[in-house]
Image (tube, rainbow, N blue to C red):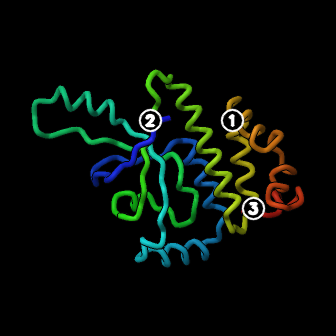
Amino acid sequence: MNKSIIKRIAKNSNLSWHPMTKKLHKSFMKSYSDEFYKTIIKMFQYNLQLSQQTIYLISNREEVKLLNQSKKSKEKVNIDYQIIAGCFNPWFDDEVLRTNKQLVAIELSPVEGQSKKVFEDELRTLILLDFLKSLSQANMSALGNNFHELRNIIKSSEQLKHAYSELMGNSISAEQFAEYFGRQRDYVYKHKC
């Protein structure tokens, strides 16, 4: 997977979420109380320099390059981006991608000759690993919410089942998920919204 730094995202670029990232982010955010989330947003709203983060994106840069080459007019097609990873925290706001000078945005692209499927598998693995890293660092009241969405996503892909079991030593279960956080199995079911 190639990586390059994005210096700026145009205000009129479309910004969307990778479907797996979107599901896991939604699950992640449900695990925080509204009061905690409001406090975090208020704290970082005017202090963006405190919320330095690295966000991973993919884009349609190659398609846009081809489209813009064939255009005779000065009006060019914008590059659109999709959020992949680096967003699993309570202070992430996708609008910050356009305004925060402290943000590091890294664009991921396939290695020359890499198939679309292999690249997508690598992206999904990156999303899974970033999500697990964020869970291990999180302070959330409803940690159990994340188990169910994570289990559904892992079971949807043989490649993710393999990546997860290689990382964790076995397949996903409530007991194993709870142990990851030093808890008993019932913790997964008792700590959800």
CB of mark 3 within 8 Å of CB of mark 1?
Answer: no
Sequence-first disc among 3 and 1: 1
Q: Residue at x 73, y 40 (%)?
A: 164
Q: Is residue 164 above or below residue 177?
A: above
Q: Amino acid at mark 2?
A: Ser
Q: Amino acid at mark 1?
A: Leu
Q: Is residue 133 above or below residue 170?
A: below
- Residue where numbered disc 1 is placed: 160
Sequence-first disc among 1 and 2: 2
- Residue where numbered disc 2 is placed: 109
Q: Nearer the viewer, mark 3 or mark 2?
A: 2
x%, y% of residue 116?
A: 50, 25
Sequence-first disc among 3 and 2: 2
x%, y% of residue 72?
A: 10, 30
Q: Is residue 72 above or below residue 97?
A: above
Q: Quadrant of the C terminus?
A: bottom right
Q: Residue at x 62, y 39 (%)?
A: 125
The image quadrant of residue 19 is top right
Q: Residue at x 24, y 29 (%)?
A: 67
Q: Amino acid at mark 3?
A: Lys
Viewer-side residue, 1 vs 150: 1
Going by the image, does 94 lie left or right of 23? left
Viewer-side residue, 152 vs 171: 171
Residue 192's label in the rendered image is 3
Q: Residues within 10 Å of mark 2 (few under 14, many from 20)?
A: many
